[in-house]
Amino acid sequence: MTDRSAAWDLLTEFTQSESLRKHALAVEACMRAYAKKFGADEELWGTVGLIHDFDYEKYPTSQEHPYKGNEILKERGYSDEIRRAIMSHAEYSGVTRDSQMEKALFACDELAGFITAVALVKPSKSLAEVEAKSVRKKMKDKAFARSVNRDDIINGARDLGVDLDEHIAFCIGALRGIANELGLAGGN
């Protein structure tokens, strides 16, 4: 099952938070861009990105997320491939990241949130002002977006086999494509 409208309905059924919905859209955009780059299935990768945290608002603890979501996805007929990828994005799940899609999800998840945070502190609150260099600079500031695990960003790029600066720039480009949806087009 990789129907985008069904995935969006699932996300919105479980997630009321606008910021968490925007995070899902951001990860989806990065995943679609990587799927295109790697010649993979954009719908499949996009679906995984869109719903990877769909259960987080209702089940935020490490004892529940993404385990509860995995049960719900199974009940609703989502494939083992999708469910495994989502399970693998949580370091503590014990599910290894073996496929390129699984590695991309992990690489994009924290970074998409961090890039969004960087855009939000720009004067125009616009992704147009965000560059890889400014993201790297903010990564060194431990007080900035402190809940974002920098090691996950670094290790995610490494495991995906991409240079960190290129990965950051690539994801910024993907997010710029949906800047309006994210509320990060400036002038808001």
Image: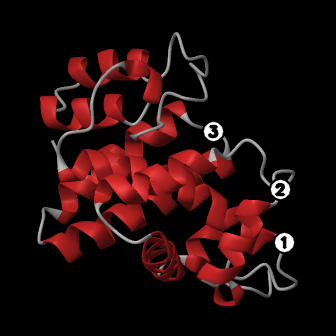
Q: Residue at x 52, y 54 (%)?
A: 153
Please name the residue shown 34% across and 19% down the image: 94
Q: Which corner quadrant holds the N terminus?
A: top left
In the image, residue 175 above or below residue 93: below
Mark 2 nearby-residue class (10 Å; few <14, some 14–19, many ≥20): few
Residue type at the position of mark 3: Gln
Is 67 left or right of 146, judged from the image as shown? left
User: How did the renderer colour the structure?
Assistant: secondary structure
Farthest residue, direction top: 63
Point out residue 84 in the picture as x, y percentages from the top left corner: 23, 30
Residue occupied by mark 1: 121
- Expressed as whole percent of the image width and height from the top left, the position of residue 92 reads 46, 21
Quadrant in which the C terminus is drawn: bottom right
- Judging by the rendered image, the residue that carries numbered circle 3 is 16
Q: Is residue 181 among the parts visible in the rendering?
A: yes
| Location of residue 81 (image quadrant) | top left
Label 1 is placed on what type of residue?
Val
Where is residue 56? Give x, y as percent.
55, 29
Q: Quote the CA–CA distance across marks 1 and 2.
A: 10 Å
Mark nearer the N terminus (2 vs 3): 3
Disc sitting over residue 144 in the figure: 2
- Amino acid type of disc 2? Phe
